[in-house]
Each structure stands twice: as C-alpha cells, then as structure tokens.
Image: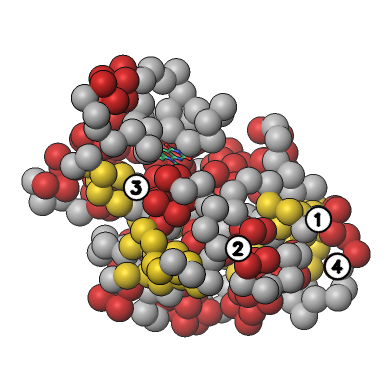
Amino acid sequence: MGAYLAITGGVGGAKLALGLAKLLGPEEVTFAVNTGDDFEHLGFKICPDMDTLTYTLAELSNRELGWGRADESWSFMSALEALGGETWFKLGDRDLALHTQRTTMLNAGATLTEVTRHISESLGVSHPILPMSDDPVHTRVHTPQGPMAFQHYFVRDRCRPTVTGFEFAGIDNATLNPAIVETLRDVRGIIICPSNPYVSIDPLLAIPGARQLLRACHVPIVAVSPIIGGHAIKGPTAKMMQELSVPVTAGGVAAHYGDLLSGFIVDATDADLDGTLEVPTIVAQSVMVTLEDRIALASVALEFIEQLR
Ligand code: FO1
C-alpha cells in the first residue's frame, strides 16, 4: 500500500500534519512543504514553513507565537538591537541553532532535502519532510507600490500592503523534489492542508509539470478549506481574497483549486455550501484547537480519500 502525500505550508497546515502523523507511520505519509517563503537573512538560510512543520512534528513549536521554537530566549536579538542590527525578523537563541546548522550544511554542498532530513531526524521526527524543491523559489507579493519579498510583506509590513497578485521567482528553473516524485509513483491519496492557497500551496503547484503530475496519479486529491465562515483562522488568506476580488468563502478556495480537486472539506459553519460546489464536499469540524481536533480532522480527510478511491 502506497503512502499519502500531504502538501502543506504554514501554521494551519502543520496542525493537520500533526494529526496525520499521529495516525500514520513514517512509511504511510510524506509531507511536501512550501519553500516560497524561504529567504536569506543575516547570513542565514531561513525556511519558515519547513521549520514550523519540523518543530510541530517534534512537539517543540512555540504555541504562543505560532512560529519558532518553544522555550525560547532572545539574547541574540537584544544584543543585535544594541548594535543597531536588523531586528524586524525575530530569531530566537535556540531557533538560531537550526538556521546556523542548515546554512553550514548548505554551504558545504548538501541539498535542502538532505539538510532537512538531518535536522528533522536530529529533533526526533521520523516522518519524511520534503521541501517542494531543492531549487530556490522566492514568492513575491505584488502591490500597488511594486513587488515585495514575501517576508517583507508578511512580517516586516504585517500584511498591510494591498495584494494585486503573486510571483514565484525562479519557478521556471525549479524541479519538483525527486523524493516527492518518487512518493507519487505509489501514492494512495493527496491531502492539501488548510494552508494559504496563494502563497503556501500555489508555489508547489506552479513548479513546471507538478499540477499535471498530481492529476496523473489518478488518486483522490482532497483539500481542507482554510476559510471558515468567511474568515481565516490565522494569517492573511481572507484579506488576500478580498483584495483579489475573490469571494471570501470556502467556495472561493474550491474554485481556486478548480479541477485539481476530487474532494473538499468545509467546516460545520459552512455546512450550507454542501451540495452547492462542483466538487464532492463533506462537512467536518475543521477548527483545530486541541490535539484531538487535529487527529479527528486528519481521520476525516483519510476516510474521505478512501471513500473517493
Ligand atoms: N513570523 C513573524 O510574524 N515574525 C517573526 O519575527 C518571525 C520570525 C521567524 C523566524 C523563523 C521562522 O522559521 C519563522 C518566523 N516567522 C516569523 C514565521 C514566518 O515567517 C511566517 O509565519 C511564514 O513565512 C508564513 O507561513
């Protein structure tokens, strides 16, 4: 029996990923992660979405912040501030160790996939975490003031600029991670986690040939809506949809993924959408507060895939 592939980005995606990892063994689910948010900062290579997933699966994530590592201290940041350094992007002392190790290994010639495996295994994570590509891809957010690097938009400017579109610089020369291609050879089903469709999931789908390859697997592709009752639990998804003049509804998300989907999961709040969308839809409790919520939603997604097979 093949493994499931879960495509994920930031915090919302990682919550469902943890539920999946609790239900399935390392040979039964593989995580394909957005790297469009990655950037070089203070000489370090930072991979926020992979870090969020790694810390989440290692049960080391910082619950208060929603990013970074638990039990964090900030001596480096304070010392940097005193020296007049750039402090808009916060790197905790423990987190810094991860970025240092990743950057050192990359500079020594390792691929991002190899580095990620080393880091995740060192932190006790046995499920495969795969960057969507080993090639650099940089998400840029288009605004009326011009294109912005993703982390400038997201963290420095707190998603305030109006979004007019997106660009994934480097995508034309990027190839889908060969380890993801290998997983797809014998995949049982594909789960699109409730991450931001535009900036967390689209970068992977935009890799040349990726969307076609997913469809060519002829297995169910099920997405969980990150929009619940017209709002995103966290992050700028709803604001982006509004600025792009897309209906801020779960239906707007389903329409965005279009014919890629075989199934769609909406929250109980959006139960009225059931039967109104072109794609087979089921209703579930998709607000994930507790670990039990994460496991329950993961279980619903897996059962839905089995039904659709
Ligand atoms: N997000 C913030 O809102 N502020 C930060 O200072 C910040 C630092 C940071 C450091 C390492 C890391 O792996 C992630 C970090 N994030 C921070 C989160 C991250 O930039 C975003 O949540 C994602 O890019 C969106 O998925």
Residue 281 seen by the camera? yes
Q: Which residue position is annotated with label 1?
A: 229
Viewer-closest of 96 and 161: 161
Category of crowding for the residue at label 2, using alpha-carbon neighbours closer than 10 angstroms: few (below 14), some (14–19), many (at least 20) = many
Q: Is mark 3 within 8 Å of ligand 1?
A: yes
Q: Residue 258 carries which label?
A: none
Amino acid at circle 3: Cys
Point 45% across, 45% down: residue = 155
At mark 3, the secondary structure is loop
Quadrant in the picture for residue 280? bottom right
Question: x and y percent of residue 172 in the render?
Answer: 30, 78
Q: Which mark is residue 273?
A: 4
Q: In which quarter of the image is ligand 1?
A: top left
Q: Where is residue 97 in the image (x, y as percent from the top left)?
A: 26, 28
- Residue 71 shown left or right of residue 296 in the figure: left
Q: Earlier in the sequence, mark 1 or mark 3?
A: 3
Mark 3, residue position = 47
Q: Give the label on residue 240, or none.
A: 2
